[in-house]
Amino acid sequence: MMRDSQVEVTTPATTSADEHATSAANTRSFAEILKRALRVLFALAMIAVTFAILTLSLTSTGTTAHKDFIAIWAAGRLLIRHVNPYDAAAVFPLEKSEGYSETQVLLMRNPPYALWLSILAGLLSPVKAAAFWILLIVASIVASIRMLWNIHGRPPDRLHLLGYLFAPTFACTVFGQISSFVLLGVVGFLYWHRSRPFLAGLCIVLLAFKPQVLLPFGLVLLVWIVLRRQYWVLLGAIFGMAMAMAVPLWFRPSIWSDYLPIFHGAVADSVIIPTISTLVRIGIGGHAQWVQFVPAILGGIWAIGYFARQKTQWDWNRHGPLLLLVSVFVAPYSWFPDEIVVLPAMLAAVYCCAEHDRSLLGFAILDVAALLLVFFAVRVQSGAYIWTTTAWLGWYLFATGSIRDQHVLSSGVATS
């Protein structure tokens, strides 16, 4: 009887405690859901505001024609008419008709397999096409940073948001540069090369929009495909390239012969581009075009040696960041917005600093200095940008301690 009475007395107390715990759990659950919802709404609001500001900047009267985008739009509009999109005599009047006031024509210098993007822009008026173009750029940057966050294991510290403050990221959006799609190709390859090799191969097409920026990276990629027998990656790259070339070839079968003068002209014009390769060319004092490629050749030799030393343990997410930085550092010709492709390396170094309790002050100083150049509209042709590739490489090596002490990215990559 005593036991029964004790049970009767304690049962209401136990039930009350359970109800209180359940109520508290429900309250916490609701609070977490509300908190996540507010974060999503805030993120969407920030993206919407950023998109609106950039679109207004690019599409406002008198500015659309003075962005690099006008060359992309003109190339697409001409190609739709079956006209050579690389012909300065055809491009210049079209740009002038839209308010372009410079004395030199602005040409799209990307290879023909990048022209399908310009065709999409050429179907619209310049203002509408500019808004559409900004939307594509913002989407590619958001997708790239999101995938990098997943590669790093989705840490809760939100350090990946620093990617939006990276100076080349801002410059790429302001100038309407195609380099954001190159970043998407690089990150897409890093994200899918283990789980979905065919998709990783498709991403190589985007990576190749500016092949001169990633020569050592591309060389190691080719060697890796052959030695590791990554046939699905190769098949994806071939299929993607065929699809990318199909549309331009349909509009103009002679597109490759149209492009050859642009290819040779790009090398000749690179004497005015602020890169390390330009300094080497000027320092040697020669006018031979091959001198511009000396740093890239040396970088390629180093890259093969780097891959050979790590061949049995090669991991793109571990060794790829340094390869990206060296590739941009030795590029024969590139512009400041092209440096957005080193964003995976910068975020890897940021996470390395966070893991080892190292300060991010060095990165902040360098990034703010570069942002000020963009904010004050310093022309990308200016020598003021000559230091940036060296700065990113130097800070990465400092932040990671040494080449051997690189931050190891999470090997568990999401498959969706």
Image (cartoon, rainbow, N blue to C red):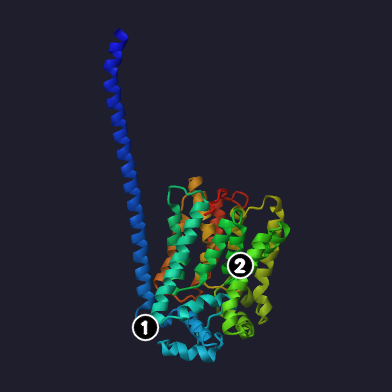
- Give the secondary structure at mark 2: helix
Q: Name the image quarter holding the N terminus.
A: top left
Q: Is residue 111 something that shows in the picture? A: no
- Vertical comparison of 370 with 281: above or below: above
Q: Is residue 326 something that shows in the picture? A: yes
Alpha carbon of mark 1 to alpha carbon of mark 2: how far? 34 Å
309 left or right of 7 in image = right
Identify the mark nearer the N-term, 1 or 2.
1
Residue behind mark 1 = 62
213 left or right of 136 in image = right
Rendering quarter of residue 53: bottom left
128 left or right of 111 in image = left
Residue behind mark 2 = 214
* Residue 73, x across and y down, in percent: 47, 81
* Residue 7, x across and y down, in percent: 30, 15
Taking the spot 50% from the left edge, 78% from the top edge, the residue there is: 118
Disc 1 marks a residue whose amino acid type is Gly
Q: Which of these two is toward me, 309 or 200? A: 200
Disc 2 marks a residue whose amino acid type is Leu
Numbered disc total: 2
Binning the other alpha carbons within 10 Å of mark 2 as few (below 14), some (14 to 19) or many (20 upward) gives many
Binning the other alpha carbons within 10 Å of mark 1 as few (below 14), some (14 to 19) or many (20 upward) gives few
* Residue 244, x across and y down, in percent: 58, 73
Confirm or deny contact between disc 1 and disc 2 (CB under 8 A): no
* Residue 149, x across and y down, in percent: 48, 53
Taking the spot 32% from the left edge, 10% from the top edge, the residue there is: 3
Numbered badge on residue 110: none
- Give the secondary structure at mark 1: loop
Q: Which of these two is toward me, 50 or 395? A: 50
Q: Which of these two is toward me, 265 or 194? A: 194
Taking the spot 56% from the left edge, 85% from the top edge, the residue there is: 86
